[in-house]
Amino acid sequence: MRHKDYVDRAVAIQTRMPLSTVRTVTAAFLDRIATTLVEDSTLELQNFATFKVEIRKRPASKSKRPTKKVYVRFIRKAALTRILNQLVEEEITMEKYGVDESDDQNYKKASDDKKCPKCGTTTEKHGRVIICPKCGTEPFEAQK
């Protein structure tokens, strides 16, 4: 989890402003968010998110007294959701790398009757893995 100090330092580097100035500005900005939520219970930051104060009440029961809890909901806007999804996709995307087993005993041409089901090219066998020179291992992978 990142803290305010991390954000302050990153903004100072990006804007080339003194760190003390950035700390003052972000503290004032966060204070203004809190004050606005107390006054209006909702704050919308265009193309980013909406902050909304919610008060949840629980009625009394035999074993518990009534309670009142205050929550601040963070509702993402479409633009922020799109950016977050792109970041997640970039982070999760895995590249397929073949294992280089270039020993002659592990590298054998498959027999002529072993053709790629996708393009018809003669396949190669690397250990126990069948590979098409054009399509890779995709035609031999299990379908979801």
Image (spheres, rainbow, N blue to C red):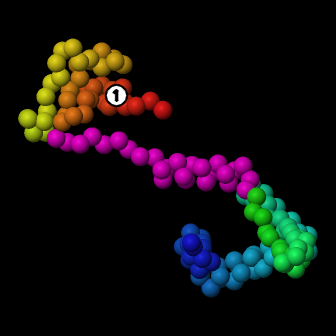
The residue positioned 27% from the left and 40% from the top of the image is 98
In this view, which residue lies farthest toward the front?
A: 62
Q: Position of residue 69 (x, y in %)?
A: 83, 74
Secondary structure under badge 1? helix
In the image, 80: left or right of 64? left
Location of residue 47 with respect to 3 vertically, above or below: above
Pick the front one: 4 or 109 = 109
The residue positioned 10% from the left and 39% from the top of the image is 103
In the image, 134: left or right of 8? left
Location of residue 7 with respect to 96 vertically, above or below: below
Pick the front one: 57 or 106 = 57
The residue positioned 83% from the left and 73% from the top of the image is 70
* Magenta span of residues: 76-101
In the image, 101: left or right of 2? left
Which residue corresponds to mark 1?
Answer: 140
Q: Position of residue 31 (x, y in %)?
A: 78, 79
Indicate the quadrant where residue 106 lies: top left
Question: Is 48 covered by the magenta stretch?
Answer: no
Indicate the quadrant where residue 48 lies: bottom right
Number of marks drawn? 1
Residue 36 is at least partly visible in this image: no
